[in-house]
Image (cartoon, rainbow, N blue to C red):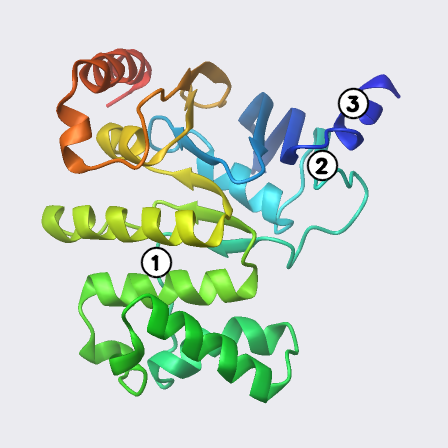
C-alpha cells in the first residue's frame, strides 16, 4: 500500500517504475530478462538507458508501452497505476517503419488517424509540425526518395503527433552514419526543447547519451538491473564542443568503464 501511494502521489514524475521484473520461457528454460528495475522520468526530462546488447532495454520499453507485461513491480504513468498504457506514450522502435505507399504527410498523419483526430484538425497539426521542423517541402515525397536522416525525422514527427508529451525512443539513430547522427541529435534536442516533452531514450553510444541527457541509467548484462544513475551536469543549451569539456570526458570514461565490465563477447 505504501509503495503504491508513493507512486501515485509523485506530482512531478511522468513515469515511475519500482521493482519491475520480467522472465521468459524458451522451451523448458526460464530466461530472466529484467531483475528488479527502479527508475523515473520527470516532467520535461530527457533520460537515457545504456547497457550491453541484449540486456533487456527493449523489453523494458515494451512493458512501459503496454505491449508486454511485467511479472512483478509497479508502473505509474502520470500517477496512474491501474490504467492501460497502450496509446498513452509515443513509442518509436529502432527502425522507422514508414509505410512506403504513403507520402511524408500521410505517414505523419498516421498517429493522428489512430487517435481519431478529425481530418481538418489533423492536417493543421501535421502541416504546422512539418513546417516548424523543416520538412514541409518534402510533404508529398515518398519514403524511398528520402535520406536515412529524413526518414528518421518523419518517423519522429509521427511519434510526436501520436503522443506529444511522452516519448519512448529506442535507439533511433543507430543505423545512421556519424555525420547524419550528429545532425539528428541536434534536431532532436531542438524538438525536445521546443515541445517540452518528456523522453526516455535508448542508445549504445555513450557520447550520444551524454550530449542528449539530463540523467543516464546504466544497465547491467541480462538480467538487467540498474548499475548506476549518472546525472549529466553539463549546461544547456549544448553544442558538440560540450563533449570536449573536462566534465564530459570524465563522464564518458566513467560510463565506458561500467559498460566494458558488463559486456560479453
Q: Judge left or right: residue 86 versus residue 219.
A: right
Badge nearest the viewer, 3 or 1? 3
Residue 169 % position (x, y): 43, 48
Q: Is disc 3 surrounded by few (<14), some (14 to 19) or many (20+) residues within 10 Å?
A: few
Q: Is disc 2 surrounded by few (<14), some (14 to 19) or many (20+) residues within 10 Å?
A: many
Q: Secondary structure at mark 1?
A: loop
Distance between mark 2 and mark 3 Cα atoms: 10 Å
For mark 3, what is the residue? 6
Q: Judge left or right: residue 158 versus residue 146.
A: right
Q: Residue at x 32, y 83 (%)?
A: 139
Q: Could you tell which of marks 2 and 1 lies nearer the N-terminus?
A: 2
Q: Is disc 1 surrounded by few (<14), some (14 to 19) or many (20+) residues within 10 Å?
A: some
Distance between mark 3 and mark 1 Cα atoms: 36 Å
Residue 61 % position (x, y): 52, 42
Q: Residue 232, can we see it?
A: yes
Q: Quadrant of the C terminus?
A: top left
Residue 189 % position (x, y): 33, 46
Displayed quadrant of residue 77:
top right
Q: Could you tell which of marks 3 and 1 lies nearer the N-terminus?
A: 3
The dot on residue 76 is 2
The dot on residue 95 is 1
Q: Quadrant of the N terminus?
A: top right
Q: Residue extending furthest right?
A: 1
Q: Could you tell which of marks 2 and 3 lies nearer the N-terminus?
A: 3
Relative to 130, does residue 34 appear above or below in the rendering? above
Q: Secondary structure at mark 2?
A: strand
Depth check, front residue: 240 or 84: 240
Amino acid at each position: 500500500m505504501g509503495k503504491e501511494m508513493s507512486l501515485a502521489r509523485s506530482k512531478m514524475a511522468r513515469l515511475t517504475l519500482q521493482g519491475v521484473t520480467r522472465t521468459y520461457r524458451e522451451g523448458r528454460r526460464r530466461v530472466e530478462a529484467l531483475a528488479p528495475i527502479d527508475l523515473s522520468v520527470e516532467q520535461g526530462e530527457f533520460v537515457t538507458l545504456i547497457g550491453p546488447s541484449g540486456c533487456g532495454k527493449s523489453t523494458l520499453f515494451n512493458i512501459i508501452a503496454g505491449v508486454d507485461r511485467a511479472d512483478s513491480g509497479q508502473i505509474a504513468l502520470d500517477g496512474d497505476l491501474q490504467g492501460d498504457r497502450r496509446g498513452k506514450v509515443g513509442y518509436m522502435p529502432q527502425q522507422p517503419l514508414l509505410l512506403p505507399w504513403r507520402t511524408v504527410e500521410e505517414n505523419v498523419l498516421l498517429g493522428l488517424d489512430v487517435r481519431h483526430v478529425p481530418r481538418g484538425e489533423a492536417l493543421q497539426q501535421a502541416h504546422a509540425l512539418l513546417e516548424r521542423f523543416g520538412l514541409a517541402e518534402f510533404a508529398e515525397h515518398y519514403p524511398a526518395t528520402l535520406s536515412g536522416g529524413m526518414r528518421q525525422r518523419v518517423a519522429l514527427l509521427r511519434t510526436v503527433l501520436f503522443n506529444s508529451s511522452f516519448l519512448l525512443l529506442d535507439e533511433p539513430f543507430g543505423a545512421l552514419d556519424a555525420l547524419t547522427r550528429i545532425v539528428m541529435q541536434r534536431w532532436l534536442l531542438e524538438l525536445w526543447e521546443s515541445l517540452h516533452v518528456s523522453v526516455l531514450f535508448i542508445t549504445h553510444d555513450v557520447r550520444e547519451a551524454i550530449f542528449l541527457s539530463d540523467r543516464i541509467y546504466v544497465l547491467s548484462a541480462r538480467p538487467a538491473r540498474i548499475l548506476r544513475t549518472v546525472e549529466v551536469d553539463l549546461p544547456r543549451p549544448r553544442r558538440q564542443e560540450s563533449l570536449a569539456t573536462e566534465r564530459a570526458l570524465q563522464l564518458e570514461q566513467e560510463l565506458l568503464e561500467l559498460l566494458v565490465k558488463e559486456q560479453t563477447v
